[in-house]
Amino acid sequence: MVKYNVDLEGKTVLVTGAAGFIGSNLVKRLFRDYKDIKVVGIDSVTDYYDVNIKYERLKEIESLNRDWTFVKASIADRDVVNDLFDKYHFSVVVNLAAQAGVRYSITNPDAYIESNLIGFYNILEACRHHEVEHLVYASSSSVYGSNKKVPYSTDDKVDNPVSLYAATKKSNELMAHAYSKLYNIPSTGLRFFTVYGPAGRPDMAYFGFTDKLVKGETIKIFNYGNCKRDFTYVDDIVEGVVRVMQHAPEKQTGEDGLPIPPYKLYNIGNNSPENLLDFVTILQEELIAAQVLPADYDFDAHKELVPMQPGDVPVTYADTSALEEDFGFKPNTPLRKGLRLFSEWYKQFYCKS
């Protein structure tokens, strides 16, 4: 177990992507755990998916009446980023802002270059010129590409991305490593595995499937259902992020007199991949239990098995041993419990009668 060396009490933290799924949950958790913390959030609130969900998340944060500042802007805007760093002198930066989604990166590549590369570069430059205790940033399980060896370990080579999204996330890891080496910036990258939960991203399968089933449309199950995903509940992701925030990799000097990069990578996944067809069955049962769908819903009539899509991979499976070893934690929310909580939220948010 590592020793915590970053005390978040009394600190100012920047969370980018604060209106996003993980970002908003992280902000709420920080305010729950710490009495004296200031959080600044930045998010461009794009219409990549339903902005009402994003504003609802922000409303929840506002309702806590804590030391919270929100800036609606893009991290690709260097002046905005620099102004925030000049003004608030952040101790810890958590970069969760990114254009997400594998399939969208095939049709809208520009969005990924702007947010994931230029935006992250601006964050790195700002951390370089304003000393921060720790930079934590989101990577993704997609960096593993079509690797055959499972479970995926952070020690594995990840040089074969199968989507632009994955390539930008791998680029983030390389850029962070370079800045850690050159400027002694303690940074930790977190490879998230298929995050789900209430008020999540509507482009994710569990959410998209639900929308389609409610409308009586057909859901497409890729690779004829022969896909496995390491579904990870959002609270488990946030728990991992909060623990990691509190331990910055130690600064050390190498034999050459230059910094040994204070740099780490961890997987955060459930370490238990679920077959897509089993996942759909559990989702169906929980949607009926939450009264989102009627008990006699004909699921077979609304399911279509289709081939694999470009950019997709057949399996994701996290080796979380490093996270367990260093932080004494591994995600453990059962899929059924997570989908139940999602179904109950969906009923409340969308099925108001």
Image (spheres, grey):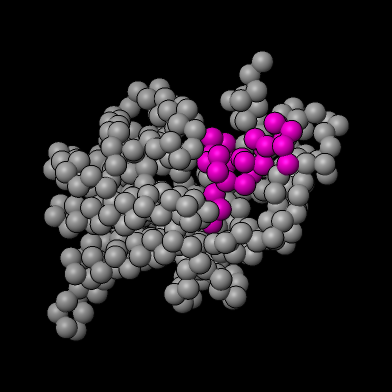
Residue 35 horizontal side relative to residue 260, left or right:
right
Residue 34 horizontal side relative to residue 305, left or right:
left
Query: Which of 258 and 282 lies nearest the eye of the viewer?
Result: 282
Q: Position of residue 57 (x, y in %)?
A: 45, 31
Q: Position of residue 129 (x, y in %)?
A: 13, 55
Tell me: residue 335, above or below residue 153.
above
Asked whether residue 254 is drawn in magenta, I would say: no
Q: Position of residue 268 (x, y in %)?
A: 50, 58
Residue 266 horizontal side relative to residue 125, left or right:
right
Is residue 182 in view from this perspective?
A: yes
Quadrant of image for the C terminus: top right
> What residue lies at 28% left-to-right and 45% top-to-bottom?
75
Is residue 241 in view from this perspective?
A: no
Tell me: residue 273, above or below residue 108.
below
Residue extent of the magenta highlight: 193-218
> What residue lies at 35% left-to-right and 23% top-to-bottom?
65
> What residue lies at 35% left-to-right and 65% top-to-bottom?
171
Which image quadrant for residue 69? top left
The residue at the far top in this view is 353
Quadrant of image for the N terminus: bottom left
Q: Position of residue 26 (x, y in %)?
A: 42, 41
> What residue lies at 27% left-to-right and 33% top-to-bottom?
71
